[in-house]
């Protein structure tokens, strides 16, 4: 049984990863509201804090999505990242990307609603 709270969608876009010591690019394989899988030959240690940036081309102006996160795991030719912080504009773009590329956008919106409800309940 899967422990995922959010649907993952295939999404092919280039992402830039920046750490305290270096910067590199890779190709996003899949994306969710809480993380992504990046195809890359680069390697970072699990837990390393990173800044992630994706630029969506084909729109004017181009849309830039930024995240703060960390390396969740490293396998073969890819690294998985979890998102820790995201600004509101980037969050809205991410929500639209995941919902639009999902086979079930209603399910994606319900996952987001449940996550917000749980967060609000924790804060009270």
Image (cartoon, rainbow, N blue to C red):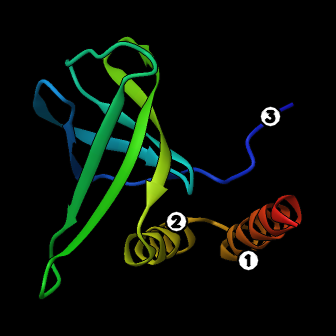
Query: Residue at point 41% right, 16% down?
Result: 74
What residue does disc 2 label? 98
**Of callouts 3 and 1, the N-terminal one:** 3
Could you classify mark 1 by the number of other residues whose Cα lies within 10 Å: few (under 14), some (14-19), or many (20 or more)?
few
* Image height of 115 relative to 22, above or below: below
Could you classify mark 2 by the number of other residues whose Cα lies within 10 Å: few (under 14), some (14-19), or many (20 or more)?
many
What is the x, y in percent for residue 6? 68, 53
Location of residue 78 by image quarter: top left
Residue 96 left/right relative to 58: right
Nearer-the-camera pick, 119 or 17: 119
Disc number placed over residue 2 in the picture, else none: 3
What residue does disc 1 label? 106
Q: Secondary structure at mark 3?
A: loop
Nearer-the-camera pick, 61 or 85: 85
Query: Residue at point 30% right, 59% down?
Result: 66
Residue 18 left/right relative to 12: left
Residue 22 left/right relative to 46: left
Could you classify mark 3 by the number of other residues whose Cα lies within 10 Å: few (under 14), some (14-19), or many (20 or more)?
few
Asked if labels 1 and 2 touch by Cβ distance under 8 angstroms, the answer is no
């Amino acid at each position: 049984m899967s422990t995922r709270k959010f649907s993952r969608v295939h999404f092919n876009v280039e992402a830039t990863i920046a750490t305290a010591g270096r910067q590199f690019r890779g190709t996003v394989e899949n994306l969710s509201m809480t993380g992504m899988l990046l195809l890359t030959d680069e390697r970072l240690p699990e837990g390393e804090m990173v800044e992630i940036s994706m630029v969506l081309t084909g729109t004017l102006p181009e849309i830039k999505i930024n995240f703060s996160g960390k390396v969740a795991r490293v396998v073969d030719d890819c690294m998985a990242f979890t998102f820790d912080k995201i600004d509101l504009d980037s969050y809205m773009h991410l929500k639209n990307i995941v919902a639009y590329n999902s086979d079930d956008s209603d399910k994606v919106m319900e996952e987001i609603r449940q996550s917000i409800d749980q967060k609000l309940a924790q804060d009270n």
